[in-house]
Image (cartoon, helix red, strand yellow):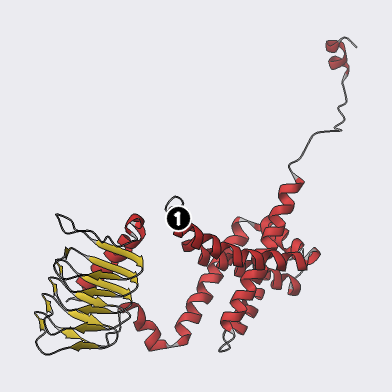
Amino acid sequence: MSAGRRLALLASTTVAVLLVPALALAQTGAHADPQDQIVISGTVAVPRGRVVDEIVVLHGNVTVGGVATGDVVVLVGHVTVTGQVSGDVMAIDGSVTLGPNAQVGGDVIAREDVRARPGAKVAGRIRRHVAFMWRTPVSVFGRFASWLAVTVSTLALGLLLALVAPRGLDAANTAARTAPWASLGWGGALALALPALALLAVASIVVLPLGLAVALGLVLIGSIGYAVCGFLIGRLLWREPRGRLLAFTLGWAVLRAVGAIPFVSGITWALGAVAGLGASAVATWRARAAGGKHREGRVVTLTEPMREEAGL
């Protein structure tokens, strides 16, 4: 299978998982027409005598004893085929096992091993230990690739916050200085509550879109907290009224330098995200409690024409 076709297949897999959440549970009944089996997390078993179309699993295992008229794609998990698959069989992060009566009309591709019993028939190619496209930079550059990606991303995000929401950063800095324990407490609570909320929402059909939105936004929320933490550290080195951009850059440089230490980067990222998120939460609460500006007590001086007009 060509690289372009594989890219299109992976893209369609991602879109299917994100845009068809109602099919998160594999259907088990018989249908007149073959049905797609799209599962976010779980096991798909196609027994002998049953016919389905495409099978797409984000996390789980697939067993095909019947017939799959389309492709079988598993992102994280293993595939076992003892029946017939008309398309390709792909285990992007797993292995594939072909029984003695297995028939595959396309290619068989796996990140791990492909075990084919005698008698198994594959019309296309069998490719074992395939490094898929998003793994290539990591395999070439090692850990530096992920460190560089986080470094550049957090720098861009922090500079954007300093330009778009400068007063918000100042308020978070004030909250961190005046209420450090409350900021850490709120940050830890949110770090636990948001993933739990996402899991509960995903488990419910009614608010499933909200759960998916929160789950997909957790990385962005954590990155914003990490960027805010960089600003808080920078303000310790570059105090007001000096510029915010330079303050953030200094704090960000300290965080990323510590993050370059093996086995420490993940811990510092989590602690930074919690600290920044907590300070932002406290600042937001204070702004909500303070309310807007009011006009009570404003003194108005009446001029002579105004007095005459008012009859005074």
Q: In this view, does 148 lie above or below 187?
A: below
Q: Which residue is drawn at 29% across and 73% down?
A: 74
Q: Position of residue 295 (x, y in %)?
A: 80, 34
Residue 130 rendering spot, x and y as whole percentages: 27, 85
Residue 49 horizontal side relative to residue 61, left or right? left
| Residue ranking furthest to the right | 312
Q: Is mark 1 on a helix, strand or loop?
A: loop
The residue wearing badge 1 is 204
Image quarter (top left, top right, bottom left or bottom right) of the C terminus: top right
Q: Circle 1: is it few (<14), some (14-19), or many (20+) Cα within 10 Å?
A: few
Image quadrant where one finds the N terminus: bottom left
Is 249 or 137 nearer to us in this picture?
137
In the image, what residue type sits under mark 1?
Ser
Vertical arrangement, residue 159 with respect to residue 2, above or below: above
The residue that appears at 56% across and 71% down in the rendered structure is 155
Residue 204's spot in the image, x, y percent? 45, 55
Give the mark count: 1
Expressed as whole percent of the image width and height from the top left, the position of residue 70 reads: 16, 66
